[in-house]
Image (cartoon, coloured by chain):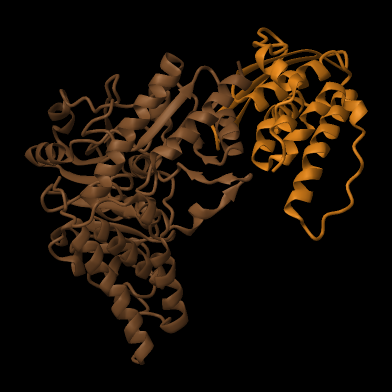
Chain colours: A brown, B orange
Amino acid sequence: MATMSHDHPFDLEAIRKDFPILSREIHGRRIVYLDSAASSLPPHPVVESMSNYYETTHANVHRGVYATAEEATRLYEGARGVVGRFLGATDPNHEIVFTKNTTESINLLAGSWGRANLSEGDAVVLSIMEHHANIVPWQMLAAEKGIELRWIDIDSHGRLVLDNLDELLNGAKLLSVTAMSNVLGTINPIGELARRAHAAGALIHVDGAQAVPHLPTNVTELDLDFLSFSGHKVLGPTGIGVLWGRASLLKDMPPFLGGGGMILDVRTDRFLAAEAPQRFEAGTPPIAEAVGLAEAIRYIEQIGIGAIRAHEAALTSHALDVLNDRFGESLVVHGPPAGDDRGGVLSFTLGDIHAHDVAQILDSVGVCVRPGHHCAKPLMRHLGVPATARASFGLYSGEDDVAILVEGLEQTAKLFS
Amino acid sequence: MADLEDLYREIILDHYRSPRNRGELEGDGVVRVEGFNPLCGDEIVVSAIFSDGQLSDIKIGGQGCSISQSSASLMSAAVKGKSIEQVRQIIDTFKTLMTVHEAQLEETETSVEPEPVDLRSLGELAALQGVVKFPVRIKCATLSWNTLTQCLGEAGL
């Protein structure tokens, strides 16, 4: 993956000032937000762009001829260009589909491309570390179409086992895999996976929900076919997601949801679908959210996604060291050691203390972490744990946050000793 | 913020560390029901034997957080050997304790004045009243109770 250049040094304190929630106190203490893998915080410019839009422009898109309707349409369509640039897409106007979130993007892919192109006996290859969003839509399709699901395993460090990948891909039509695990923090070798999928005659879809906000992700350099991600994990608003697909593939895919906005013509006995991407955007789309998403991406580009990755990688390495120094073997962090294939997601178990209890005590010192199965139950079963607590970083996270996390974990260990 | 000590009382931690009636009953006449909390993945297995109008034996299996595990342990101790009628009464009282506070926390305008819960009738179970100050955890506390209610249903009682 390419690293974008950036002109300014990474200034954590200046960045934090852009995130109003970070000045909140929780139970009398500074909020320590370590749940960016679930949802990132929006910086002020994103919130402002959306309220500006609602206060100065709002109108429905693609219909009115009046000035504000035309402005709204321009902003909404312009957001495709911003997203496309960020992803290195060659033809944003025909390749960026706005959805509700990553989950809907993958349901669209399974429901449209999958239903049209897969039939009984066809195989789709997934990995055991997938989020339910990249499992259940394929299971639903399997129940309907009789397709076969094959699973890439992981090793003891939480890395994909690729020794038998060619075997798994043999005769498969699609490899659908996450670029970064939302539990293990593993960053997968997407370029290699794309090469091997294509060599086997399969397409590749990448779940970019965790990777796009934290790593340079260029769909052209990686030679991908489809990529999904969510606005609310990339400093943008909830309610908007993206499915990027090659124009040549989207062009032949049937509609997913039917309704207004996705047609060229409707008669009583038939309809004619619009071209992609409008074909996949039935109903009034998330207009303000597209404005906010575009602003979020501009914000990230200004800092530089490469600089963000460097900051988070250093912080991840620091956190792994500190946790190991302080808790030793009593604290198990799942996933690979610090390094190029390690993202800022730390899922851990502390002794035999349940994740819910860990998260509860951490809350009392203002630390926001997530307990549970993280919508990855097949992976949790594979790891043999019912639940983990997960601390995950964003560009606004720092070593001071890790220090308070450690303080809270010390209190937890003491209470349950 | 509600105090953490309200949640993690000594009785609760004691039942978490040394759960009572732990395990699973086997054999004829055992009613076995699994309860799940899909939010956190906790699961409780309640196995019970009803005979002569009594809940004559009960065991608790499964895994979960300190609140779900201690609530299950406290429940098993409270209902074991009691008549079906008493079991129902204990379940009702406990659930009222939890739902009353849920309604208050949601500040529902239509919420009716709750029946006062006689905490003394709950004995050790009263230790769980602090849970209601932590709304997210109420589901942890009620998991085993809902599962026991299902057991009664399965047993046709």
Q: Disc count in the image?
A: 0
Q: Is residue A260 left or right of residue A373?
A: left
Q: Residue at x 76, y 19 (%)?
A: B11
Q: Where is residue A25 shown, x and y percent of the image?
A: 58, 50
Q: Where is residue A105 shown, x and y percent of the image?
A: 33, 54
Residue furthest to the bottom in view is A66
Q: Residue at x 37, y 56 (%)?
A: A14
Q: Is residue B114 above or below residue A125?
A: below
Q: Nearer the viewer, residue B143 or A295?
A: A295
Q: Is residue B48 left or right of residue B119?
A: left
Q: Quadrant of residue B66?
A: top right
Q: Is residue B84 above or below residue A250?
A: above
Q: Visible in this render: residue A320?
A: yes
Q: Quadrant of residue B70?
A: top right
Q: Residue at x 23, y 33 (%)?
A: A341
Q: Where is residue A412 shown, x and y percent of the image?
A: 58, 25
Q: Residue at x 41, y 83 (%)?
A: A57
Residue furthest to the top in view is B27
Q: Quadrant of the C terminus of chain B?
A: top right
Residue furthest to the left in view is A199
Q: Is residue A25 left or right of residue A2?
A: right
Q: Where is residue A214 shown, x and y percent of the image?
A: 29, 47
Q: Nearer the viewer, residue A11 or B82?
A: A11
Q: Is residue A321 above or below residue A121?
A: above
Q: Visible in this render: residue A129?
A: no
Q: Quadrant of the N terminus of chain B?
A: top right
Q: Is residue B148 above or below residue A199?
A: above
Q: Nearer the viewer, residue B121 or A41?
A: A41
